[in-house]
Image (cartoon, helix red, strand yellow):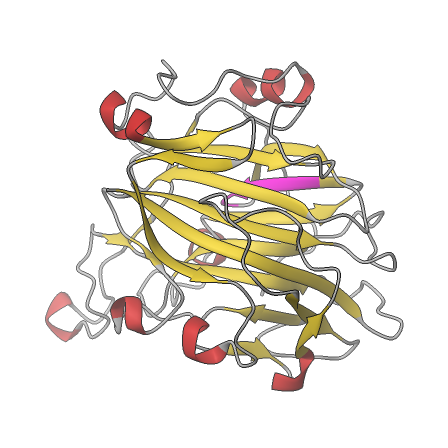
């Protein structure tokens, strides 16, 4: 079971990016050493208008137009499927990753209520399964690939942003099944990458260790672009966070961009305790475990929901260098 109290270790390289001035754009960023400079420069974020430029390919998207998200996301992981609602009006005003409007005014609402229990008090989009490939869930993040994941979140006025308890709103989590997931260890259970909204901040964690944070506010559509090179090797994997915190359509303000953080961005499978010849999860020991995207809300059940704790989600795209 997830721990409610966790030690948060802030990487030294992060302190300047969180507390200092905005960083330079990622094209040509000398801190990016795990992917070729050509790969980074040919598809990257233009911070001036928060859109992708260069040779970028759309992998998958959800513009909230479909009333039922399950065919695209694989499943609605909530106590009851009606905890997801598609709403209209006051949707995310940001353009898509390619700089165009999505052509509709819909957005998705995910909510939990006190006592909900879908493997914890959660309501998220995203099927936790890797064996069906990209057809089984919204997207899979595979080793040796780079992806830029765009999504927009709004925390409603009643959202408990002051709580000190953990409150996850986005995950790039290792997908099931795996022997690591069944190991019963903190490392096996902790998401490789997750985003929390708590204590007045957006907080990104790697294996439950704090690696990035920025001020959060309620009742504003906040746009994220998470640029990741996926690898279980901390010397190869890296992640960059871009965010439009104030809704002005750019990532140029303080706290809205961070330099590359070098860390493991995928988990590594462990040997099957019954012998590799009996392994049925399809991932050999020592190989990277693909991750999948999850958006919604998953929090400490001690957080009180009166009558419900809700998050709004819209305008999701995953891009790859073409």
Query: Considering the image in quadrants, where does the N terminus appear?
Result: bottom right
Residue at image x 38%, y 21%? 27
- Report if residue 206 lies within the magenta region: yes
Q: Main secondary structure of the magenta part?
A: strand
Residue 263 lies, in percent from the top left, at 40, 32
Residue 20 lies, in percent from the top left, at 66, 14
Q: Nearer the viewer, residue 9 or 184?
A: 9
Left or right: residue 110 versus residue 151 is right
Query: Considering the image in quadrants, where does the C terminus appear?
Result: top left
Disc tally is 0
Left or right: residue 151 versus residue 260 is right
Residue 57 lies, in percent from the top left, at 30, 47
Residue at the left extreme, as displayed = 277
Residue 39 lies, in percent from the top left, at 25, 30
Q: Nearer the viewer, residue 249 or 109?
A: 249
Q: Is residue 21 visible?
A: yes
Residue 2: name its quadrant. Answer: bottom right
Residue at image x 31%, y 28%? 40
Q: Nearer the viewer, residue 165 or 125?
A: 125
Residue 301: name its quadrant. Answer: bottom right
Answer above or below: position of 169 versus 249: below
Q: Is residue 299 visible?
A: no
- Report if residue 198 lies within the magenta region: no
Left or right: residue 77 versus residue 303 is left
Answer above or below: position of 33 versus 89: above
Residue at image x 64%, y 40%? 203
The residue segment tinted magenta is: 202-207
């Amino acid at each position: 079971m997830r721990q409610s109290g966790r030690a948060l270790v802030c990487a030294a390289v992060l302190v300047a990016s969180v507390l200092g001035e905005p960083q330079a754009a990622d094209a040509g960023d000398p801190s990016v050493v795990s992917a070729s400079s050509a790969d980074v420069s040919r598809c990257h974020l233009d911070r001036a208008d928060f859109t992708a430029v260069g040779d970028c390919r759309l992998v998958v998207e959800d513009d909230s137009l479909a009333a039922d998200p399950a065919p695209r996301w694989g499943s609605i992981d909530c106590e009851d499927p009606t905890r997801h609602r598609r709403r209209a009006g006051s949707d995310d005003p940001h353009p898509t990753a390619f700089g165009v409007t999505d052509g509709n005014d819909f957005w998705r609402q995910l909510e939990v209520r006190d006592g909900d229990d879908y493997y914890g008090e959660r309501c998220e989009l995203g099927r936790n399964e890797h064996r069906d490939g990209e057809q089984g869930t919204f997207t899979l993040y595979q080793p040796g690939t780079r992806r830029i994941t765009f999504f927009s979140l709004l925390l409603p006025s009643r959202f408990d942003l002051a709580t000190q308890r953990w409150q996850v709103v986005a995950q790039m989590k290792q997908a099931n099944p795996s022997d690591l997931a069944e190991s019963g260890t903190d490392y096996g259970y902790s998401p490789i990458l997750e985003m929390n909204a708590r204590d007045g901040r957006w907080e990104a964690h790697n294996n439950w260790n704090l690696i990035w944070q920025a001020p959060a506010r309620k009742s504003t559509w906040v746009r994220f672009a998470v640029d990741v090179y996926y690898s279980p090797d901390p010397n190869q994997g890296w992640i960059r966070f871009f965010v439009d915190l104030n809704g002005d359509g750019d990532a140029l303000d303080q706290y809205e961009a961070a330099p590359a953080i070098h860390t493991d961005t995928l988990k590594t499978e462990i040997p099957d305790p019954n012998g590799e010849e009996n392994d049925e999860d399809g991932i050999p020991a020592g190989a990277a475990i693909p991750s999948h995207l999850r958006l919604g809300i998953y929090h400490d059940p001690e957080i009180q929901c009166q009558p419900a704790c809700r998050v709004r989600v819209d305008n999701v795209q995953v891009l790859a260098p073409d």
